[in-house]
């Protein structure tokens, strides 16, 4: 199943949820976004050594012009220097933003399944189903989002006519979407994704479905559960794949502390069932800045207890 998700996951840079306004005049705004994360990590693979990794080093500019009281147009340009490599362009897109009708983004961007995952892990846990560190997105993509508070819908479509990756191919396409609702203290979301892959050497038709539910009705406690299923008919090289995952996650907040624990069971036709878990503690030492420690493990063969100590900052 993990191999299937590698086929589905295409690299793109992650956006930030917060921003710093650096210009606001004549109905034009410019916001600076970014995130930095450095971690000392020992992976769960047997005999893995502890190493320092720069996992995020991104910044971007979000420029918007107000057409009227409802509509804004603009563009976003991001740079990424993860793992101490040379800085390169991340997400780059133009966009239309309407408070009434939602937003449309066109260009290189993260598609909807990049939002999936219930885990509050930093390095281990639920995110493993989506191959930790992978993002869903392509250069030639369009995405629509609308959120009305009690309900929300998103959809994205991508192609690769420029043949910029080996994931989709010039004759393939990628579609994903989600729909959800919020009622009382519940937030429930359904996802779907479809990959038609034709790279010349690999042909595949893969589908992914997911359902996530969150509950925040207890003081300082958050609970979440998720189910994920992927199926693929691969005509070349001739190996079909099928797998699913079930995940549980719980958090407890205490002043500037956030504690989290999670469990995931992975199962698939081409691998033995695997149980993974994580336990962590994060402390907010400044706004949007967290230092954390995490333990993670699995019952897979040739594995060991993993651990991570890191710091991340977002703006």
Image: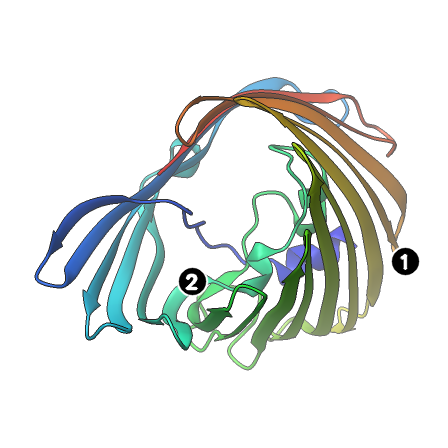
In primary-sequence order, the first of circles 1 and 2 is: 2
Residue position marked by numbered label 2 in the rendering: 109
Q: Residue furthest left?
A: 26
Residue at image coords 64%, 18%: 49
Q: Is residue 60 left or right of residue 272?
A: left
Q: CA distance from mark 1 to mark 2?
A: 32 Å
Residue position marked by numbered label 1 in the rendering: 269
Give the label on residue 91, or none: none
Q: Position of residue 38 (x, y in %)?
A: 46, 25
Decide: is 42 above or below 160.
Answer: above
Q: Position of residue 275 (x, y in %)?
A: 86, 38
Residue 98 visible to the viewer: yes
Q: Position of residue 203 (x, y in %)?
A: 68, 75
Q: Which of the two discs, 1 and 2, sits closer to the camera?
A: 2
Query: Residue 205 lies in what quarter of the image?
Result: bottom right
Residue at image coords 65%, 32%: 220
Quarter the C terminus occupies: top left
Quarter the N terminus occupies: bottom right
Near-viewer residue (252 or 138): 252
Mark 2, residues whose alpha carbon is within 10 Å: few (<14), some, or many (≥20)? many
Q: Secondary structure at mark 1?
A: loop
């Amino acid at each position: 199943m993990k191999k299937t998700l590698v086929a589905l996951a295409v690299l793109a840079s992650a956006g930030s949820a917060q921003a710093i306004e650096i210009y606001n005049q004549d109905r034009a705004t410019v916001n600076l976004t970014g995130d930095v994360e450095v971690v000392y990590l020992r992976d769960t693979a047997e005999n893995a050594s502890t190493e320092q990794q720069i996992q995020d080093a991104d910044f971007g500019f979000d420029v918007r012009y107000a057409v009227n009281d409802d509509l804004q147009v603009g563009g976003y340009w991001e740079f990424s220097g993860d793992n101490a490599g040379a800085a390169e362009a991340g997400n780059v897109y133009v966009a239309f933003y309407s408070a009434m009708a939602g937003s449309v983004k066109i260009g290189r961007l993260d598609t909807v399944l990049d939002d999936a995952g219930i885990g509050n892990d930093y390095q281990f846990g639920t995110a493993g189903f989506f191959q930790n560190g992978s993002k869903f997105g392509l250069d030639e993509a369009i995405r629509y989002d609308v959120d009305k508070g009690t309900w929300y819908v998103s959809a994205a479509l991508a192609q690769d006519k420029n043949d910029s990756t080996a994931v989709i191919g010039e004759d393939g396409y990628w579609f994903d979407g989600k729909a959800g609702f919020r009622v009382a203290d519940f937030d429930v979301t359904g996802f779907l994704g479809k990959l038609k892959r034709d790279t010349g050497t690999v042909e595949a038709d893969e589908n992914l479905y997911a359902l996530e539910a969150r509950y925040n009705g207890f003081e300082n406690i958050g609970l979440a559960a998720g189910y994920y299923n992927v199926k693929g008919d691969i005509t070349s090289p001739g190996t079909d794949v099928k797998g699913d995952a079930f995940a549980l996650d719980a958090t407890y907040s205490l002043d500037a502390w956030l504690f989290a624990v999670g469990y995931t069971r992975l199962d698939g036709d081409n691998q033995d069932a695997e149980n993974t878990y994580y336990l962590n503690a994060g402390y907010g030492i400044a706004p949007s800045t967290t230092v954390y420690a995490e333990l993670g493990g699995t019952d897979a063969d040739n594995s060991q207890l993993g651990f991570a100590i890191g710091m991340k900052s977002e703006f």
